Image (cartoon, grey):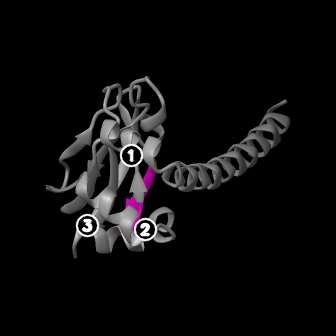
């Protein structure tokens, strides 16, 4: 599958024109990772965006020597978009949990393209909004469970 074909199947790119997709494809590279191989480390200063062509990627955080899985991304999903808009280190690491082929877009190249074609940013923001909404629901659910647990203990 070509990068452009994959881009068309990813929700935030699916509504973009072929012309815009061709521009995005021109700044994309296909990269392969073996199972267990790190894509980026927690704390690293990278801003690349990744799309999963095949395989599976886990986003993880370290906590007192244990690894906590934050998210799992499969074919046609993307990750790494938060780092595009911040000058902060990665808040979590990513590794291939299966042999994986990804499409990588260098952050600085995508930012340049966003200035030229703002519709790309709008699509990214829509997905970030959906992810934020899901995260908020998870936090609410955990807060309720924690409150209920605290009531039982006291």
Q: Nearer the viewer, residue 40 or 8?
A: 8
How far across and how far down the image is residue 67, in percent? 37, 38
Q: Is residue 73 magenta?
A: yes
Element type at marker 2? loop
- The circle on residue 3 is 3
Specify the segment rendered in magenta: 71-77
How far across and how far down the image is residue 103, in percent? 26, 58
Residue under the image location 22 percent in, 76 percent down: 1
Q: Which one is in front in this view, the residue at disc 2 or the one at disc 1?
A: 1
Element type at marker 3? helix
Marks 2 & 3, CB-CB < 8 Å contact: no
The quarter of the rendered structure image containing the C terminus is top right
105 to 73, vertically: above or below? above
- Quickly name the residue at label 2: 10
- The circle on residue 72 is none
Residue under the image location 36 percent in, 44 percent down: 110
Which of marks 3 and 1 precedes in the sequence? 3
| Mark 3, other Cα within 10 Å: few <14 / some 14–19 / many ≥20 | many
How far across and how far down the image is residue 115, in percent? 46, 41
Image-quadrant location for residue 139: top right
Marks 2 & 1, CB-CB < 8 Å contact: no
Element type at marker 1? helix
Which of marks 3 and 2 precedes in the sequence? 3
Q: Does the magenta stretch include residue 11?
A: no
Which of marks 1 and 2 precedes in the sequence? 2
| Mark 2, other Cα within 10 Å: few <14 / some 14–19 / many ≥20 | some
From mark 2 to mark 1, how far is it between C-alphas? 18 Å
Residue under the image location 31 percent in, 41 percent down: 109
28 to 115, vertically: above or below? below
Residue under the image location 70 percent in, 44 percent down: 142
- Quickly name the residue at label 1: 113
126 to 40, vertically: above or below? below
């Amino acid at each position: 599958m070509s990068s452009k074909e994959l881009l068309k199947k990813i929700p935030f790119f699916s509504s973009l024109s072929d012309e815009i997709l061709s521009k995005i494809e021109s700044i994309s590279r296909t990269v392969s990772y073996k199972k267990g191989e790190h894509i980026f480390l927690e704390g690293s200063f990278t801003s690349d965006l990744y799309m999963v062509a095949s395989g599976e990627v886990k986003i993880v955080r370290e906590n007192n020597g244990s690894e906590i899985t934050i998210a799992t991304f499969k074919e046609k999903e993307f990750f790494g978009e938060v780092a595009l808009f911040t000058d902060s280190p990665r808040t979590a690491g990513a590794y291939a949990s299966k042999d994986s082929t990804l499409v990588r877009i260098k952050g600085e190249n995508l930012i340049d393209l966003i200035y030229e074609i703002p519709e790309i940013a709008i699509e990214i923001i829509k997905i970030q909004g959906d992810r934020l909404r899901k995260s908020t629901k998870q936090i609410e659910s955990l807060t309720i469970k924690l409150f209920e647990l605290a009531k039982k203990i006291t």
